[in-house]
Image (cartoon, grey):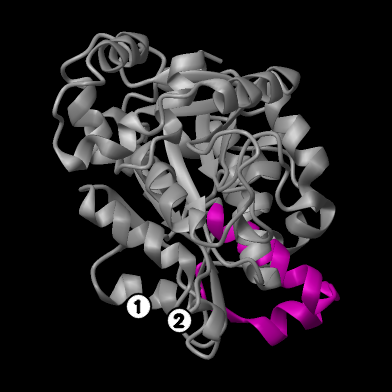
Amino acid sequence: MNLYDVWFSTIRVSDERKNKIMDSFRNTEELWFFLRNTKDYNYAPSVRPILDSMDLENVEKLLNKGSKYDIKTVTKKDDNYPALLKNYDDSPYVLYYVGNIDKINELKSISIVGSRLCSNYGKEVTNIIASELAAYDVNIVSGMAKGIDSIAHWGAVNNGAFTTAVLGCGLDRIYPAENKNLYYKIKENGCIISQFPPLTPPFAYNFPIRNKIISGMSQLILVVEAAERSGSLITANRALDQGKDVMAVPGSVFSNKSKGANDLIRDGAYIFTGMESILSLLGIYNKGFKKKKIKKHSKEMSKVYSVLTDTPMHLDDIIKITNIDITLLYELLLEMQLEDSIKCIAGNYYVKVNDDFQ
């Protein structure tokens, strides 16, 4: 970590104002020495918070703490600062990170967010999407919270893909604590970012602030499940303010966990209909997608596919013919829909749409 970057990040002025200040200086060290040499100048009262923060003793404590956790700093004037995030006047001038931040600018990025208290449907959709995206070298960005966030990260990690976690606390803290293993997995083959210096607790008001990083560093924001007042909607609305594409996974009209996501679709968000809908918005869709993603399937999935035709078949009939447990059958049908092998039409009827299934 850079001593003066850490100092600058602790100054209690807005990110937008910090960026304006740094327009006039090459780096934070130059700013610090300029202020020290002109401290007796009759500055406006608005500059007082900066002048009052000149003591570096506490900053050195943060620096020592950060070094124990391999924490580094990057600024908006560095080439390896996330390029998409640089575009905004209120993005943090200083970011803290562990892991490989350089790779972020080499990849397409999608932010996947959703409910902490997600349903089995939300878990399954998130895991499948993250796992499928792993084959396309897409950076999966999320907040490492319980629920959808963690599942998205694990989907990347378990498939050897790059993923970025954005935290609402200092990087010397793992929050939530249950994600300790995930934290170190991401650190090993991804990146963990925060705008908050070491020793910063996970205060509730930090999370809406960190959401602008989650939305700002991706081309596309995907909301899997979100209640009417979910924090995921803050991220989605922030993305819209930033001019980003927002997509939502449709859920049951009877589920409160999907009301926020369904409302986004009603208000004009892109609707998730399969992997092609994501890839096309990321600019990596290609006509060979279906063939590229062909893989050997389980006997149960092959059995389901073998009974379907281009004539709609009801779910109850599929159960009777295949004798597959309904819970497993729902998972199989969902995965096959995401692969565009089958399609669900009104009233729980299913049809075959892809003859490339193996």
Give me the C-alpha separation between circle 2 and circle 1: 6 Å
Where residue 94 is drawn, which disc sits there? none
Give the number of callouts: 2
Q: Which residue is mark 1?
A: 263
Between residue 310 and residue 333, name the one nearer to us: 333
The answer to if 325 sits in the magenta stretch is yes
Q: Amino acid at mark 1?
A: Asp
Query: Tag 1, which secondary structure?
Result: helix
Magenta part of the protein: which range?
310-338
| Residue drawn 30% across the image and 15% down it | 77
Residue occupied by mark 2? 259
For the N terminus, give its image quadrant. top right
Residue 49 colored in magenta in the image: no
Q: Amino acid at mark 2?
A: Lys
Q: Position of residue 273 (x, y in %)?
A: 42, 60
Up/down of 23 relative to 287, above or below: above
State yes or no: discs 2 and 1 in contact (Cβ < 8 Å).
Answer: yes
Which quarter of the rendered picture does the C terminus lie within? top right
